Image: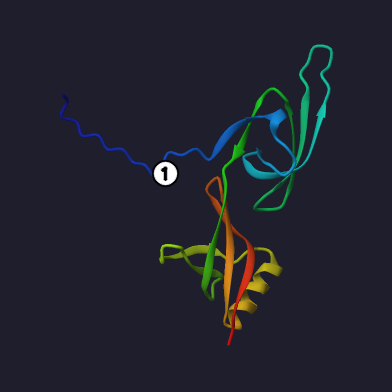
């Protein structure tokens, strides 16, 4: 055995951010990675095979975080990356002056690393519910190392 000391640094659990799926099996409403962005498929069209070619799938998808429209054309027999998309609900505890939110996790801890959503309607709904003293529950979507508040619900209560 050598006297060298090995040090391994790891910041992730080793779980993949995506999984492969055949392009011909991806449907409208599913998810796909286009230009390294997680997207929700809004339209799929398949062209017939040419004289020597493959059938091709034309995907039109919306980035789940920026809402930008992206398109891709892939042979239907090839694999595409499909992102793991998770959605978790948290209770809103506080909104800071600098636009960050403090959320209560299921285990009783706090999550303080998320900014207010870029969608003005969601931000307004969060602030008004919070200012009125209502219990506000936010849905946080996470995929490929990114997280964003995507929905807001008010749950009774109030002053």
| Coordinates of residue 34 in the picture (x, y in percent) | 67, 38
| Coordinates of residue 25 in the picture (x, y in percent) | 70, 31
- How is the protein colored in the picture? rainbow
Q: Secondary structure at mark 1?
A: loop
The quarter holding residue 99 reads bottom right
Figure disc tally: 1
User: Height in image: 29 above or below 99?
Assistant: above
Nearer to the camera, 2 or 80: 80
| Coordinates of residue 48 in the picture (x, y in percent) | 83, 22
* Residue wearing tag 1: 12
Local packing at callout 1 (Cα closer than 10 Å; few below 14, some 14-19, many 20+) is few
User: Height in image: 130 above or below 31?
Assistant: below
Residue plotted at (56% across, 55% down): 147
Residue furthest out toward the top: 52
Residue furthest out toward the front: 156
What quarter of the picture does the C terminus occupy? bottom right
* Left-right relation of 107 to 21: left
What quarter of the picture does the N terminus occupy? top left
| Coordinates of residue 131 in the picture (x, y in percent) | 60, 82
Residue plotted at (59% across, 58% down): 148
Residue furthest out toward the bottom: 159
User: Height in image: 137 above or below 4?
Assistant: below
Residue plotted at (78% across, 16% down): 53
Residue plotted at (62% across, 40% down): 36
């Amino acid at each position: 055995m050598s006297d060298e000391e090995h040090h391994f640094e790891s910041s992730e659990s080793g779980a993949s951010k995506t999984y492969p799926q055949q392009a011909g099996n991806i449907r409208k409403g599913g998810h796909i990675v286009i230009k390294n962005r997680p997207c929700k498929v809004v339209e799929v069209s398949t062209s017939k095979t040419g004289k020597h070619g493959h059938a091709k799938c034309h995907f039109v998808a919306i980035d789940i975080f920026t809402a930008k429209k992206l398109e891709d054309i892939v042979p239907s027999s090839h694999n595409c990356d499909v992102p793991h998309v998770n959605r978790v609900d948290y209770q809103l505890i506080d909104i800071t002056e600098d636009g960050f939110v403090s959320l209560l996790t299921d285990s009783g801890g706090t999550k303080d690393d998320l900014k207010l959503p870029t969608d003005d309607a969601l931000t307004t709904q969060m602030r008004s519910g919070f200012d009125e003293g209502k219990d506000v529950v936010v849905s946080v979507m996470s995929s490929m190392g990114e997280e964003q508040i995507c929905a807001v619900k008010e749950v009774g209560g109030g002053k």
